Image (cartoon, rainbow, N blue to C red):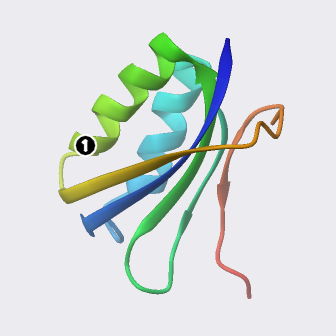
Amino acid sequence: MIRHLDITVKGKVQGVFYRKATKAVADQLGVRGFVKNEPNGDVFIAAEADDTMLEMFMEWCNEGPQDAEVTSVESHEGELKNYRNFEVVKRAL
């Protein structure tokens, strides 16, 4: 069964290629949704996949890329949006 999670990652997670690495892992696991930087320094992820893939994805979110320093990861179940792929949301110009 496909589930939707809204995930907030806190710590040193901006300026360390967290979004780019998240997309690579999501694509590898078949997770769909998006990742974006928040103004307060957090990273927000909307993720949809089956339980097994979401579990592996969440494990990765707690580690992040090499230079990241993740202090906490919060997730909440949300309404399924049926994303087609996984995207990095860039900052608005």
Kind of residue indicated by mark 1: Asn
The correct choice, above or below, for 87 with respect to 44 in the image is: above
> Which element carries disc 1, helix, strand or loop?
helix
Q: Position of residue 26 (x, y in %)?
A: 54, 30
The correct choice, above or below, for 5 with respect to 32 in the image is: below
Residue at 36%, 70% (x, y): give it. Answer: 14
Instruction: Specify whether 17 is left or right of 46.
Output: left
Q: Position of residue 65 (x, y in %)?
A: 27, 45
Instruction: Specify whether 79 is left or right of 58.
Output: right
Task: Return the residue at label 1.
Answer: 62
Instruction: Specify whether 89 is left or right of 8.
Output: right
Q: Position of residue 22 (x, y in %)?
A: 46, 42
Residue at 54%, 40% (x, y): give it. Answer: 23
Residue at 50%, 33% (x, y): give it. Answer: 24
Q: Nearer the viewer, residue 48 or 85?
A: 48
Q: Nearer the viewer, residue 10 or 22?
A: 10
Q: Position of residue 78 (x, y in %)?
A: 66, 45
Q: Is residue 82 visible?
A: yes
Image quadrant holding the C terminus, namely bottom right
The correct choice, above or below, for 4 with respect to 34 in the image is: above
Label 1 crowding class (10 Å Cα cut-off): few <14, some 14-19, many 20+?
Answer: some
User: How many badges with numbers are in the image?
Assistant: 1
